[in-house]
Image (cartoon, grey):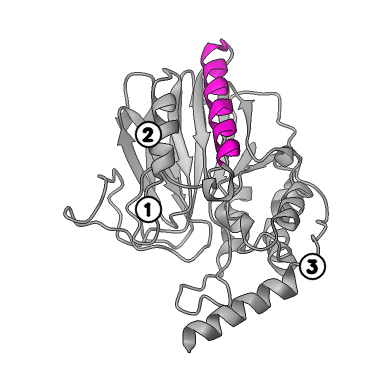
Amino acid sequence: MRLISITLLASLVLLTNCASPLPPRRMFTTSLPQRSPLTIAVIGDQQRTSEMEVWRELNTIHSDLVKEVVQSRPDALILLGDQVFSGSSSDDWRFFDRIMFPVLKARIPTFPIFGNHEYIGEDAVAYRNMASRFRITRSTWYSMVMDSIGFVMLNTNFDEFSRDTAVKELRWFKTHMRKLGENPAVRCIIVCGHHPPFTNSTIVQDNHILQTYFIPIFESNPKSRLWLSGHSHAYEHFRHNKVHYVVSGGGGGPRHLLYLEKNLRRHDDLYPGPTIRPFHYLSIQRDQDELCVTMIPLSGQESPQESFMIGPEVEAQK
């Protein structure tokens, strides 16, 4: 009976919120400052807990985290997907516009990717909601260069694709990884995709399509430094074949428990945190061919900050 009630509630919420896209106050800028080095902030999984998720953590820190990011004065901001609970919900996008207003006001260049929650509801409406805020999403995957860093922004929602679309993205990924590797103006490469190739989450699993088809291409490129993902509402830091993988899903969504026990966890986590990780954002800076990555917990969180360097040959943990 309870399952039927939750299903009916979910249907009602979607029907009342999916009628038409909600126009934003104005679009986020993508104009980068012409200086170096740049500081790039990263936030993942900003969706609020839905009214139907009565069993999950209900958070109210979204605005506080965004304000702390803006106060750190980054030169650019990357969003790792799941900006909202339902991509076609006008009410969810009003919430997003409200918490992100400081970013708009500060004119911080903002670059999102699509998460699975962007596909909840009517896909066409959800896409228009994204495209009306972010010029960069004319395609659901794209690449760019910031401060000599090549960013490859993937759409990892493979269950939403036809096989032909998935193959098209894989071919695009292979081509752009090769071009970035051959480009002398690009010193290192970061890939962003919502679903994690590696995670110890008790809620979501490793993405085996990424592991099988995308990771070998990424790891074979000598400029590859870092793979960023969300979807697991936590902070996790893995190293696989000398490349670093960071899960940054601490933007306000209901947090996931992680497997920590040796007999249960799937991967060794380099971050010595508890089973529930802090709300946080990332800060990334380039130094020559190296990257400095810092996980910054929201003020008042007890978990420690983590900072580490990623270079072409030598990696140092602080």
The answer to which of 191 and 186 lies nearer the viewer is 191
Does 169 sit above or below residue 195?
above
3D distance between C-alphas at marks 2 and 3: 42 Å
Q: Residues within 10 Å of mark 2 (few under 14, many from 20)?
A: some
The residue at which mark 1 appears reads as 205
What secondary structure is found at the residue carrying circle 3?
loop
Magenta segment: does it hold 178?
yes
- Amino acid type, residue under disc 1 in the picture: Gln
Asked if the residue at tag 3 contacts the one at tag 2, i.e. Cβ–Cβ closer than 8 Å, the answer is: no
Left or right, residue 243 beside residue 137: left
Magenta stretch in the rendered image: 163-184
Q: Residues within 10 Å of mark 3 (few under 14, many from 20)?
A: some
3D distance between C-alphas at marks 1 and 2: 18 Å
Q: What secondary structure predominates along the stretch shown in magenta?
A: helix
Left or right, residue 293 beside residue 173: left
The answer to which of 76 and 92 lies nearer the viewer is 92
The answer to which of 272 and 8 lies nearer the viewer is 8
- Is residue 148 visible to the viewer in this orientation of the structure? yes
Q: Residues within 10 Å of mark 1 (few under 14, many from 20)?
A: some
The residue at which mark 2 appears reads as 244
The residue at which mark 3 appears reads as 19
3D distance between C-alphas at marks 3 and 1: 33 Å
**Residue 57 percent across, percent down from the top left:** 46, 72
**Residue 145 percent across, percent down from the top left:** 62, 25
**Residue 226 percent across, percent down from the top left:** 44, 32
| Residue placed furthest toward the bottom | 1
- Amino acid type, residue under disc 3 in the picture: Ala
- Amino acid type, residue under disc 2 in the picture: His
- Is residue 318 visible to the viewer in this orientation of the structure? no
Does 315 sit above or below residue 61?
above
Nearer-N-terminus badge (2/3): 3
